Image (cartoon, rainbow, N blue to C red):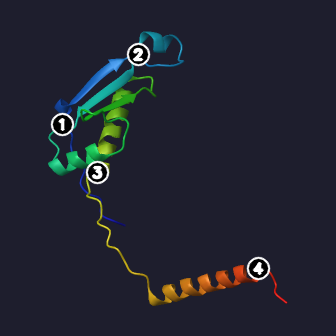
Amino acid sequence: MPAKSPTIVIPESEVEITAMRAQGAGGQNVNKVSSAIHLRFDIRNSSLTADHKERLLALADQRITRDGVLVIKAQTHRSQDMNRAEAMGRLQELVDSVAAPPQVRRPTRPTLASKKRRLEAKNLRSQVKVLRGRISD
């Protein structure tokens, strides 16, 4: 089992959390209680290391704006505290996903046996196609 890299602690001061009313059906509770959480995390102005910031900004994630702000909306739970915890968990998960640098791929060469198998398969396929042609007398 590969060793896990240590998680990066994100200071609460760098995260902007706003409570708002949740969308969708839910009855009276959803109409009167601001239980949804809107979390904003400015990647460029954060205390993360430069390589972490670079990898985060390189992600093809629709939650990251052009300005480098990560926006997470949590509204699955009825309570604001649980939604806040879920949003922080999602942020932590995203930051942890880019904590380890990607492994560099070293190109390999095909083995001699695999080359022979490939050529034999090509030759066999060629023979099948030749046999499909017109039969000459």
Q: Is residue 110 left or right of residue 99?
A: right
Q: Earlier in the sequence, mark 3 or mark 4?
A: 3
**Marking on residue 136:** none
Residue 103, quarter of picture: bottom left
Which mark is nearer the camera, 3 or 2? 3
Label 1 neighbour load within 10 Å: few <14, some 14-19, many 20+: few
Q: Position of residue 48 (x, y in %)?
A: 17, 44
Give the amino acid at mark 3.
Val
Say which of 9 and 100 sits in front: 100
Q: Can the viewer see residue 85?
A: no
Q: Can the viewer see residue 27?
A: yes
Residue 78, quarter of picture: top left
Residue at mark 1 to residue at mark 3: CA–CA distance: 17 Å
Taking the spot 32% from the left edge, 50% from the top edge, the residue there is: 97
Label 2 neighbour load within 10 Å: few <14, some 14-19, many 20+: some
**Marking on residue 98:** 3
